[in-house]
Image (cartoon, rainbow, N blue to C red):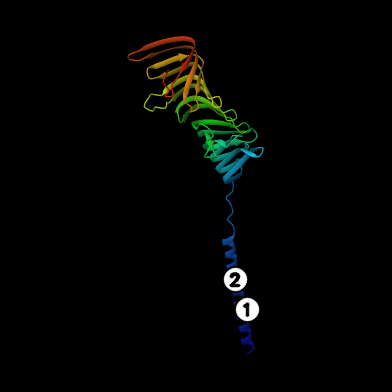
Amino acid sequence: MLRRARWLILLAILAIAGTVASVYLAQKEALRRSRPRVSAPLPANTAASANLWEYEMKAGDKAKLLIRAKQFEQVKSPPVFVLRGLELEIHKLEGSGYDLVKSAQATLDQEAGTMYADGEVEITMGLSQDPVKPAGRIMKIRTSGVTLDVRTSKASTPRHAVFEFDQGGGEATGAMYDPSTHELEMNSEVKLDWRGADARKPPMHIEASRLLYRELNADIQLFAPASLTRGTFTMHAGDSVVFLNAEGMLDRVESKEATGSDRQKKRQVQYSADFLNLFLTPKGEVK
């Protein structure tokens, strides 16, 4: 009888031990499944990485720069940030206007205070956060090799740039834009087509060695040699200034050392002057 009881006690102990082991293993598996996954180790020479990264720079209580990136990576050496899927808003300190810069990838050097995008860059100027009050004339620039000074918000490139706006478009080699002064400079080989109010008429084709568009002054400075061509009208000149009216249309041109002609079927005119004032109609035709 006693021997039989000992076997029963042994079996009971084994059953309890089996139950405890089963519960322990089940809890261990549950903990393993609920444990957060360990992040993959960072690549060599990388200090940090993140998705949907955002950074804001302010001037007083107003945003000056807003940088967004789909992917962010902090490189140890050289100490820079690599931003992929970049969107950069450059806000004007007055009003609700801002410019938008987009690039697939850019590098931000905080120590130097510069951002550089070697690939394609699209800059849209004259956007507004207030849909009722536009900030200005919208212009798009497409280029590459852009350097942005994050302290002054000046953007520049030595490469070929194509630009377009509601009244026309053009191209140049090398460009610089300063949002604080609202000035756009095209450095060389400038070609610009400016459409008039009548889309059936040919545009005014402008060429210059250099161009400076001053939005606040509503004028375009052309540096010698400069030329204007529209239909049968041609003019070659030295330094010139194109004045725009309130609607952004060509209004008047002042030129130094100007020569040209207007060769129509019934009238042929040739002219030459040390200083010339050229007046245009609302349709962009020569008066």
Q: Is residue 143 left or right of residue 154?
A: left
Q: Which quadrant holds residue 116?
A: top right
Query: Compared with residue 133, is residue 178 higher up or lower down, i.e. above or below?
Result: above
Q: Is 11 in front, or is 244?
A: 244
Front residue of 149 and 273: 273
Residue 260: percent from left, percent from top: 42, 12
Residue at 40 percent across and 17 percent down: it is 233
Q: Is residue 262 visible?
A: yes
Q: Is residue 119 above or below residue 231?
A: below
Identify the residue under disc 1: 13
| SS for callout 1 | helix
- Mark 1 packing: few (<14 Cα in 10 Å), some, or many (20+)? few
In the rendered image, the quadrant that contains the C terminus is: top left
Q: Nearer the viewer, residue 6 or 155?
A: 155
- Image coords of residue 284 (percent x, y): 43, 23
Distance from disc 2 to disc 1, alpha carbons, whole Å, reads 15 Å
Per the image, the residue denoted by label 2 is 23
Q: Amino acid at mark 1?
A: Ile
Residue 74 spot, x, y in % from top left: 61, 41
Label 2 amino acid?
Val
Residue, far right: 60
Label 2, residues with CA under 10 Å away: few <14, some 14-19, many ≥20: few
Mark 2 or mark 1, which has the lower sequence index? Answer: 1
